[in-house]
Image (cartoon, rainbow, N blue to C red):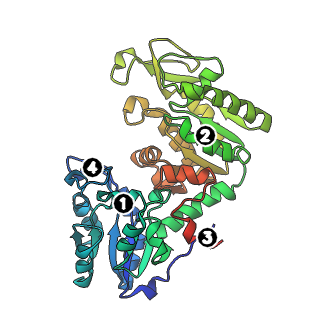
Amino acid sequence: MNLRTPDYGSLRGKKVLVRVDFNVPLKNGLVSDDTRIRAHLPTLKALRDAGAIVALASHLGRPKGKINPEFSLKTVLPAAEKLLGPIEFVEDCVGPKVEKALRNSTGKILLLENTRFHEEEEANDPDFSRSMAAPFEVFLLDAFSASHRAHASTVGVQEHLNSYAGYLLDEEISALSKVRDHSEPPFVLVLGGAKVSDKIGVIDNLMSKVSSIVIGGGMAFTFLKAKGGTVGRSLLDEGHLDFAASMLEKAEKSGVTVELPVDVVAATSIEDLSSLTSCPADEIPDDLMGLDIGPESVKAFSKIIEGAKTILWNGPSGVFEVETFSKGTKGLCYAVAKATSQGAFSVVGGGDTASAVSLMGYRSKVSHVSTGGGASLEFCEGKVLPGIAPLLLD
């Protein structure tokens, strides 16, 4: 899958609107993780070096179409300036304030106010899209993580401007296409996290391409229950027990190995460590919940992962934010990194999984860490994402 990309050198003096994703986590009014901002640096530095007049559009949080200071992108400004130098903040994303800032541009990058302060943004309103595009000559979509949303700032503006993919978006599509469309066997799909429903499309689309599916995290208990196991008070998606059973049957008929946990670390709650114990994954006492995969599961999962040539991992294997329940996810990080060092191509997707890999020091030891949660899942489901469709060359 190839995308239309710009000749950056030709953009000198051009007014360029760039859709970035500065929807970063905040703590006490400050950016607590600047990973998403850093991801855009190659594109933004290339534009700045080319002499383009650059304005950044993004959303932050869910203000539901109303102005809310809590979600102002002004909060993100110090973290962005730390990486990019002086930035001028514009207190709207459309209209006279944007036009004035562009006319009086002093070479600083402009950061526009939250696009979602306007309800027309998420509705992809044609008039709003036209107004957003009006002061600009070129549009770059660099926010892969927002490309699955048909919003004015991702799709609508492309109808009015010469539009291209930035470096980050192009890199994301290249990596995910390699996994989805050109995987080298053995291909191992590693799934975790809480919800079975989030992964159904991915499983359905990739079943014919994978050799093995490794399932940990909260979603594993739905599969264990479907096989007749007892899972105590563990997270359980009752509405998808039938899917789990049918998926296991389909995998067996297709010759795909499905590896489920054999042991878990369990407790009555995340907070009550006095009840901490290990037990078989399909024999969890009624008063306990599984909160991480156990050491035998880590060994079994790692053996499969380390033999792979292609790996897609979406979803941690436990409550990794708590040290006591982080060992499973850490073990999988090591296995994916080891396989990568042996020549495997590995992609880590999903916000929690990306955070875990970064937190545990393995980000640089895998082939690609996707910035997109929902976007990477939808891409791996085989969908053409709305923001990307207009940029396709083939």
Residue positioned most to the front: 127
Query: Is 216 placed above or below 285 here?
Result: below
Q: CA distance from mark 4 to mark 3?
A: 34 Å
Instruction: Give how far apart the Cα atoms at labels 1 and 3 are.
Output: 30 Å
Q: Which mark is residue 335?
A: none
Quadrant showing the C terminus: bottom right
Find the distance from the CA under tag 2 to the CA under tag 1.
31 Å
Q: Which residue is mark 4?
A: 26
Viewer-nearest of discs 2 and 3: 2
- Does the rendering let one see residue 30? yes
Residue on which disc 1 sits: 120
229 to 88, vertically: above or below: above
- The residue indicated by pointer 2 is 200
Amino acid beneath label 3: Asn
Q: CA distance from mark 2 to mark 3?
A: 26 Å
Give the residue at x 49% y 34%. Answer: 194
Q: Crowding at label 4, few (<14), some or many (≥20) Cα neighbours within 10 Å? A: some
**For the residue labelled by badge 1, is the local secondary structure a helix, a strand or a loop?**
helix
Alpha carbon distance from label 4 to label 2: 31 Å
Q: Which mark is residue 2?
A: 3
